[in-house]
Amino acid sequence: MSRFNLYIDEQHPSPWQQTWREFKRSHVAMAGIIMLGFFTVVALFGPLIAPYDPLLQNTDTTLIPPSWDPSGTVRYVLGTDALGRDLFSRLIHASQVTFGTSVMLVMVAMLVGVAIGVMAGMSYGVRASIINHLLDALMVIPTLLLAIIIVAIVGTGLVNSMWAITLALIPHFVHHTRNTVRELMKKEFILATKLDGASKPHIFIYSLLPNMIEMLVVQGTIALSIAILDITALGFLNLGAQGSTIELGAMLAESLNVVYIAPWNIALPGLTIFLMVFSVNVVGDGLRAALNRRLRH
Amino acid sequence: MIKILLRYTNLLVLTLLVVVIFSFALAYLFPGEPYTNLTGVIDEQAAAAHQNLSVTSAFWQYLGNIFAGDWGLSLMTGQSLADEIAITLPATLELSLYALAFALLVGLPIGFWAGLKPHKGIDYSVLGASAVMHSFPVFWLAMLLVLIFSLQFGWLPMSGRLNLLMDVPNVSGFIFVDIFLADNIDRSQAAWDAVKHLALPTFCVSIITMATIIRAVRRSTLEVMHKPFIIAAQSRGLSNAQIFFKHGFRNALLPILPILAMQVTTIITNVMIVESIFSWPGIGNWLLQAIYQQDYPAIRAGMLAVAGAVIVVTILIELFNRIIDPSREKFEDVTF
């Protein structure tokens, strides 16, 4: 940093820069973010990388083991499944569906959850109490049960299972937003803004939101890992993605009957889910640790 | 104390009422006749009569039936739903209970250990292991364990609760109680068989909860061990063991209870998934069969039973927590 500076002013890094500096110090967290970046690239450009059509069936090449096995071939890097479809292409397409939908539904849940949470946190009395009780009742219904109910009402399908998981994640965001808003509303800088005559939307946008963003990012990573696990679980139980929609959980369920003769059909999709969730968790942990360290300094 | 009890009873009744209203509304949301969805009986005249009833009086009737133990009939089997749930729900609760107990038994000591030696090799390896455990998709883990322990080595059975040759009548629904009550069988052999059947499902479910418990205990131990009263105890010359067991241990345990309350739904969801893999005759497996066969009365009743059980357990944990820890903010005490 040998930039010429006329004024001998110390340059203060912004909060985000400080967080990034703390985040970079942890190698595990950096590895996690690289892995997460890899999955993002796959989700965005996956179909361009995939060597075969994921739905192309070839009866001459069923159950070929991965290429590192003596009887595998390089043409099918990760082997083929019971219908002769290339596992590598299928994994890429499935990761795209699983990761993409999870990110999308976490964003929707976050938007709705923050809106309700801020309303609950900023209001008092009967209205706040009703919102709180309804949401607490919703929060104790297990995700899978909620999904079963929604599937019973509107039928199976990837989009319907997405609705179920979004609905299950919303109370999670409401809960944390409400608690954060309650705490912030007691602070003096909010009182000062109020005395200046700021309206509620103004308080929210200029005073509450900047102080909430970090909590939201951390909660978002937690919600993302829950979302990936739930969407694959529903796919595995045949309640989510159907038919030609390739999804990691549904892939696992399809390969159940060849589990003994072709274990790689179980191991590889599961490993992909595991790595996806693991990278999200590691990034979330690193971020939380970085924020804690920053606040302590 | 009475005030707290009243408050929690009120909360319990209100939340259960919300769930009952929700289950009543489901009968109208599901495809088909509301009357059939509520009772499981296909009868056109009764359905027409039911349609003429106002919604409120239909609801009062439904509420009366629920309390009388008449939860309707299953569309598939024609059996009473209350009876079917009385068989399946204990199996689920049993599995959840053992999974929670195992998670606590292993998670608490490891969490304390890591929390007492922060930022050292032990701590980092425990944290890393818990991050790995936390990321396992439960169904994949279950399949891997079946592949290794049941198919490859043949050490453990891969489905059910008990060997079919064991003739244990179903009295309470809890397998060990039933084994104890049954006569004419070799009890120790039956119990050993039940343990073998329990091992894999319990392990699968407890892994994720264990990871959460380890992290929570580690963090709370870390926080407590930096409190002023610990430093005061150190300055009085107490040994490390004395400080931990007399001053640290109980205070570090306090934040764990609310986390357990939050974990109840996670455990139930995981148990329901694991049940379907191990063919465990619990309510999760039963509900999944109901959805595959579009048995709407069963889904309504199962949802009522599972949500009710989760609410009762959660509120009991919260109440217990409130009683042993009066320092919690008044504001927060009715939220779980």
Image (cartoon, coloured by chain):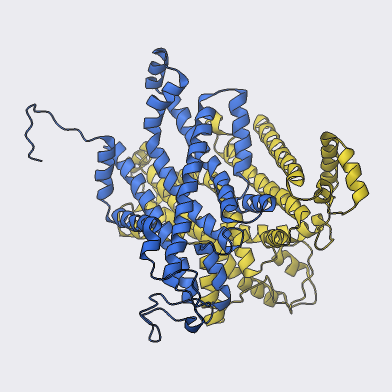
Chain seen in yellow: B
In the rendered image, the residue lying farthest to the bottom is: A71
Location of the C terminus of chain B (image quadrant): top right
Residue B207 on image: x %, y %: 50, 61
For this view, does B49 lie left or right of residue A210? right
Residue B155 on image: x %, y %: 56, 80
Residue depicted at 33% across the width and 51% down the height: B118
What is the quadrant of residue B319 in the picture?
A: top right
Residue A152, above or below A113: below
Figure colour of chain A: blue
For this view, does B244 lie left or right of residue A30? right
Residue A117 on image: x %, y %: 51, 33
Location of the N terminus of chain B (image quadrant): top right
Judging depth in this view, the residue of B147 and B298 nearest the camera is: B298
Residue depicted at 47% across the width and 62% down the height: A94
* Residue B225 visible in the current orientation: yes
Residue B196, above or below B110: below
* Residue B320 visible in the current orientation: no
Judging depth in this view, the residue of A223 and A26 nearest the camera is: A223
Residue depicted at 33% across the width and 41% down the height: A292
In the rendered image, the residue lying farthest to the right is: B45
Judging depth in this view, the residue of A240 and A224 nearest the camera is: A240
What is the quadrant of residue A139 in the picture?
A: top right
Judging depth in this view, the residue of A218 and B48 nearest the camera is: B48
